[in-house]
Image: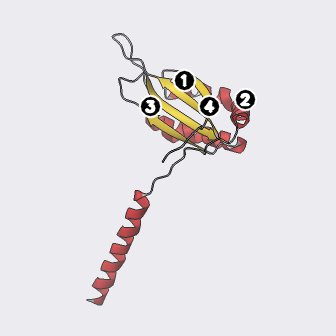
C-alpha cells in the first residue's frame, strides 16, 4: 500500500510540473527602444494563381538557420505570425536586435544566402522593413 501511495504522489508531482511547464509563455517582443526587421510574405489567391507557403519548413528549417546566422550579429530572437486566407499576407516574422546596425551587418553578411532559400518554402519573395520597438504591453 505504501508503494502505491508513493507512486501516486510521484505521479501527481510529475503531472504538476509538466502542467506548469506547458502553461508558461515565452515572450520575445524585444524591449522598448530595440530594433526589429520585419519580413512579410505576400499571399495571392485568385482565379488563376494561388501563393504557397510551407510553414513546417519555414519554422523548422529556415528561421532556425536565420537565427544561427544572425545571432553572432546580435539577433535576440524572432516571432512568427500567420494570417488567414483573406489577408494580404500569409506570414509576418519579426527578428529582434538591439540596434538597426546589427541587423544591417547580419543582412549584409547573409542576406543573399537567406533569400536564395525562399523558393524552398514560399512562392512569394518577402519585402522586409526595419523599425524600432516603441511600446510593449503584455
Q: Are marks 2 and 1 in contact (CB under 8 Å)?
A: no
Q: Are marks 1 and 4 in contact (CB under 8 Å)?
A: no
Q: Secondary structure at mark 3?
A: loop
Q: To which quarter of the image does residue 39 belong?
A: top right
Residue depicted at x 51% and y 49%? 27
Q: Which mark is residue 54?
A: 3
**Of discs 2 and 4, which sits in the foreground?**
4
Q: Which residue is mark 4?
A: 131
Residue depicted at x 31% and y 86%? 3
Q: Earlier in the sequence, mark 2 or mark 1?
A: 2
Cα gap from disc 1 to disc 4, whole angstroms: 16 Å
Q: Are marks 1 and 3 in contact (CB under 8 Å)?
A: no
Q: Secondary structure at mark 4?
A: strand
Q: Which residue is mark 2?
A: 108
Relative vertical location of residue 89 with respect to residue 22 in this rendering, above or below = above
Q: Relative to the observer, which residue lies in front, 25 or 85?
A: 25
Q: Which residue is mark 1?
A: 126
Amino acid at each position: 500500500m505504501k508503494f502505491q501511495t508513493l507512486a501516486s504522489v510521484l505521479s501527481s508531482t510529475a503531472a504538476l510540473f509538466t502542467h506548469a511547464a506547458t502553461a508558461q509563455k515565452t515572450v520575445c517582443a524585444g524591449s522598448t527602444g530595440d530594433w526589429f526587421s520585419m519580413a512579410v510574405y505576400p499571399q495571392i489567391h485568385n482565379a488563376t494563381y494561388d501563393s504557397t507557403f510551407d510553414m513546417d519548413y519555414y519554422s523548422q528549417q529556415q528561421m532556425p538557420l536565420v537565427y544561427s546566422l544572425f545571432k553572432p550579429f546580435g539577433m535576440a530572437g524572432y516571432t512568427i505570425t500567420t494570417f488567414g486566407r483573406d489577408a494580404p499576407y500569409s506570414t509576418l516574422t519579426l527578428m529582434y536586435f538591439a540596434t538597426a546596425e546589427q541587423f544591417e551587418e547580419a543582412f549584409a553578411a547573409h542576406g543573399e544566402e537567406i533569400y536564395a532559400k525562399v523558393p524552398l518554402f514560399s512562392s512569394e519573395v518577402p519585402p522586409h522593413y526595419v523599425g524600432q520597438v516603441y511600446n510593449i504591453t503584455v
